[in-house]
Amino acid sequence: MTSDTIATRPAAASRREMVLIFRLMGEAFALSVSCVHEILDPIPPTVVPNAPTFAPALVNVRGAIVPLIDIRRRLDMPPAPADAASRLIVLELPVSGVPTRLAILCDAVEEVFEADTAALETVPSLGARWPEIYVKGVVRHTDDLVILLDTDTLFRPDG
Amino acid sequence: MEDVNPALGAFVQEAREILENLETMLLDLEGQPQPEQIDAVFRALHTIKGSGSMFGFGILARFTHHFEDAFDKVRDGLLSIDDRLIDLSLKARDHMSALLSCGGDCDEAEALEASTEAGRLLRSLSDIVSSTAADAPHPPAEASRERRWRIRFRPEASALRNGMRPDLLIAELAEMGRITISFTAGDLPALSDLDPATSHLCWIVELLTRQPLSEIEAVFIFADDAELNIADVTEQAQPAAKAAPAPRRPPEAAGENVRVAASKLDEIMDQLGELVIAQARLSQLATATSDPDLETMVEEVERLVTGLRDSTLSIRMLPIEMVFGKFRRVVRDLSAELGKDVALVTEGGETEVDKTVIDRLSEPLVHMIRNSMDHGIEGAQARLAAGKPAQGTVSLSARQEGGEILISIDDDGAGLDPEAIRAKAVERKLLSPEAQPAEEELFQLIFAPGFSTAKQLSSVSGRGVGMDAVRSTVDALRGSVDVQSRRGRGTRVTLRLPVTLAIVDGLLVRLGSSVFVIPLASVEECVEVDAAEQTRDSGRTMLCIREHLVPFLELDAVFAQAQSAEPRRRVVIVKADGQRLGLVVDDILGQNQTVIKSLSQYHRGVEGFAGATILGDGSVALIIDVASLARRALSQRHAQRTAA
């Protein structure tokens, strides 16, 4: 038994990932914390005329001009105004191979938890209206379903 | 993993510079070659040969060896310099440059070595060398006597890690004559402490050769940090103790210049940009608090930041001569190809321009020079008939005017033919047959995509690319192009470019609640919109300003914003692609100097913007790119018309 535990632990540990849970219209979504740079109160955005709808604006994050990505639009959700609980999540991740800083607006930031990605379940085809390519899968956390988003596809510019 | 090895990187960089200079040196030989110039060429080749084999560029070194042989003959006065030799040398230089670009003895380099072109070059070189061998009266005096040299060489401890190959150096010595090699291993640590990448040995080589001392020194030219003693021991039996230190090449004014990666400069520029923005916010806060002490301090900081900004910008400045120098070759090659005798005159090469501008400028300038030579300058017969000297002249000049650099390409050729341009433009549907554009506007059409008036295609130009590429590059650099031409007298194309790309003087305008920046360089004037104009919805979108018709764009419409309800609006008259255009805005807020930040890949494709900046209040403002905005509006208008 002991040897069995030792043998399986590294494998199991490698499947665990720290994720940040945030809310959009009541749903719990999650992104890997490894790409989260900081979490800020909303900053008034500057709209870029004629920009693609999923990247409508720019924000000043401490002297750096950062594109604001509208993930509600990506997930086919209706737009909503920011309120007191809204937060800006600043991410830093490679987009088409280029390290890029970008920001997304969410309704609330909840917590960081260690998700067992081995237990990731795929969303049934009729299980959600979100485009499938943006969703990696679903994990259970307490009594909730947490939707793990795919940062590779979600932030790809030509989408 | 080239960048892992700094010494190899330094070699490639240095070799590239040597090759660039070599081109100029060879072209200089065309006039009246001075012995020092020939020596300089020989030294350049020798350096590349020696260091090339040391850094794993064996193929390059082998080729250079033959090239060097030819110049050895020239140096000894056995071979005279003529056009054929210069032609051949220039081609050989190009081949060396290609070999260098391969980055060492890889398959690519081997393929190049085996190419017929390389074979032809080598044959021509050896023909030249052997043609002199027969009538060679005697070898030069200095090399006549065989001497014995004792060379003591201790590489610097880290040299091996930097890619130094003592074995190759010794092999090179072996090529010069007979050698005996010994080494001392006194400094060798215990085996357990031995780091194989650290050099502990000291070689002592005895060399029996006819080559002069300078040749031996040249072998070690890249082993700068090594301990090196070269002594003439021809007459001596036990010379080691008396070995005199060989005169070393001075370390190339190392204290005066520092080579810095351009990316580091960009980083500094970025941080400086943030500092300028932070400083603007600080002075805004200070004005609001009206504390005299704070205000004094803020003024002091402002002065310092301005100074720092200017000196940082000056670091990025390079003389435009760096680009001009390349064109001598272009003009020489083209003269031969087109069978036209053309001289290149350059002026104002010392004018300094931002490195980014220099880097992007060289290609458009080549296009323009080609155009001048191909289409502008007439054949010798036609020139003589027109009472002009048979030799044509293309002159390149640069000067600074305020925050702009003006670069002109002048030719004394036939000038542009407005009627031919007109006919072509109508044929290419760039102009409607009824239109009667001013000559100036007509000339701008040569920059339109797909426009080419060359009657026959040559390898030089006339491929329909070129001039439109010139304009897009200039646009991207936030500059403009002017064309002046007189029939029979020549053409002058003037590029106006900002001195720096990092900072722009801008006009702040308001549209609804958003603020935009229009680069001041493209602004001509600001006027108020007539109340009558505001309510006009007939579809007329032009103003009459001092007798001239100026079309205007309502920015709220172009930017798909809600229609402005402001009672009094303003028009900023800008110049886009050589034409005046009004931009209707709600208000003009003032002028400022802003640091340009480029847009991310999400917004780079959005037409009409050159970048973004952060304003004094911390908000982000977009910088309008007038030329691309005008083009966007034009294509929208076309689309509307086709739809209707």
Image: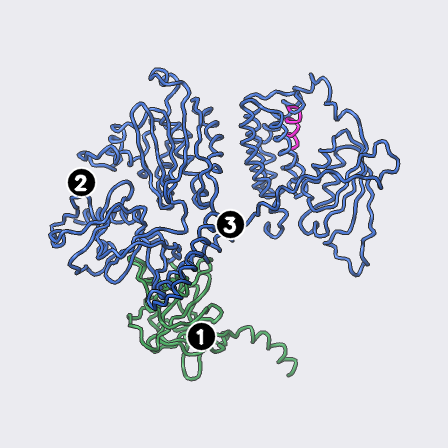
Up/down of B595 relative to A151, above or below: above
Residue sitting at x 25%, y 41%: B579
Name the amino acid, label 2.
Answer: His
Residue found at x 20% / y 45%: B551
Q: Are marks 3 and 1 in contact (CB under 8 Å)?
A: no
Q: Secondary structure at mark 1?
A: strand
What element does badge 3 sit on? helix
Label of residue A20 in the image? 1
The single residue placed furthest to the right in the displayed view is B237
Would you name the residue on which mark 3 appears?
Answer: B262
Q: Earlier in the sequence, mark 2 or mark 3?
A: 3
The shade of chain A is green
Discs 2/1, front: 2
| Residue B501: image location, x then y, percent | 40, 49
Mark 1 surroundings within 10 Å by alpha-carbon count, few (fewer than 14), some (14 through 19), many (20 or more): many
The disc placed on residue B548 is 2
Which residues fall within the magenta stretch? B64-74
Question: Does the segment drawn in magenta span residue B71?
Answer: yes
Q: Nearer the viewer, residue B499 or A136?
A: B499
B322 displayed left or right of A52: right
Residue B608 visible? The answer is no
Image coordinates for residue B459, horizontal then vertical, percent: 42, 30
- The hue of chain B in the figure is blue
Residue B175: name its quadrant.
top right
Q: Position of residue A118 (x, y in %)?
A: 50, 74
Q: Is residue B548 above or below residue A117?
A: above
Q: Callout 2: 10 Å neighbours few (<14), some, many (20+)?
A: few
